[in-house]
Image (cartoon, rainbow, N blue to C red):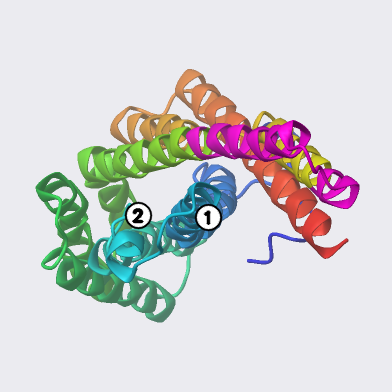
Amino acid sequence: MNLTRSIMIIPVAALLLTGCANPSAYKDPIAAFQTASTVVIESARIEYQAVNKRELYAEIDRRVAKGEKITLPALEETRLLNGDDLIARMNSLDALAEHGNLLFILANSGTPDKAKNAANSLDDAVVRLSTALGRASSDEFKNKAGAIATIAGEVTKLVLNAKIKQALKKSIILSENDVPDLIKLLKNDMDMFRERRRNIQLDARLLATNEYNRGIASNSSNPEKLKKAAAEIKKVEDAWDDLFLLPDPGFEEMGIAHRKLVEYAKTSQTPQTLAELVEAMDTFTAQAKIIADAIKTIQQKKEN
């Protein structure tokens, strides 16, 4: 999905009220869930790709400011996630995305072949995730992220027997514990990265002002160097202000929307439970729109 483009997310309630909904009440809520999930997942993927580089550059800046040597072992120590852990996170995002895609295909009365392909895609993603988890360092991530593997096998059996409706309900109910656990792990990562980003920016502010003040204190202060140091302060302060504009990663809203989807699948599907499901999906899609717009703004700044 191209997040640099504005995405149009129509509230689920509007779809239902305008008569666009499929006779199956799952269709529009799940379509909204998949669209919003795609934005959140791709946003997290961008963050995972950036986190080690951010730490690396901050360490280089710190050593330059202090006049310390830069060594490869010291740079390696800055990584929050080693290569295996990073691959495991990326594969967990793939598995989460494929689960959403499977729900979407099943909810839209996809043909058995389409449903089978979607189930196989989830199974393939789970296999890649399981392989990566075998090399990951966190036991908690291994145990909780790996649990999603139970979904694919059970659903595939129903799909092969052309039991699409049963497969949809089964794929939702089976995910009751495993998907929320994975969402929580990813949310914890995003929260930790944001706090690390804040600390890095605090250090950058200190380094920038110290550099300028050293120039002022020097008996032979250079006006051009002072201008350069002042420009760096402005740049760092702009980055600090941008931190407060970063939207919530969206995993909390994803978790709530998923929980309402499970509750709906497990109940008698009354108008009340449908209304609660629609409300949760609308909240989730609204947050996804905020995230997509924020990413677009950041990318436009980089291009200018």
Q: Quadrant of residue 90?
A: bottom left
Residue 15 seen in the current view:
no
Instruction: Label 1: state its secondary structure.
Output: helix
Q: Name the amino acid, label 2.
A: Thr
Magenta span contains residue 243: no
- Left or right relative to 85: residue 259: right
How far across and down, in percent of the image, does residue 283 sit?
Answer: 60, 29
Check disc 1 and give the amino acid type. Answer: Val
Magenta residues (range): 199-228
Mark 2 to mark 1: distance in Å? 15 Å
**Residue 214, position in %: x, y?**
68, 36
Image quarter in which the N terminus is found: bottom right
Estimate the x, y position of residue 103 in percent, counting from the top left: 42, 56
Placement of 44 over or under 2, stated as above or below: above
Look at 29% across and 64% down and name the residue there.
Answer: 163
**Furthest residue to the top?**
272
Residue 97 or 157: which is nearer the viewer? Answer: 97
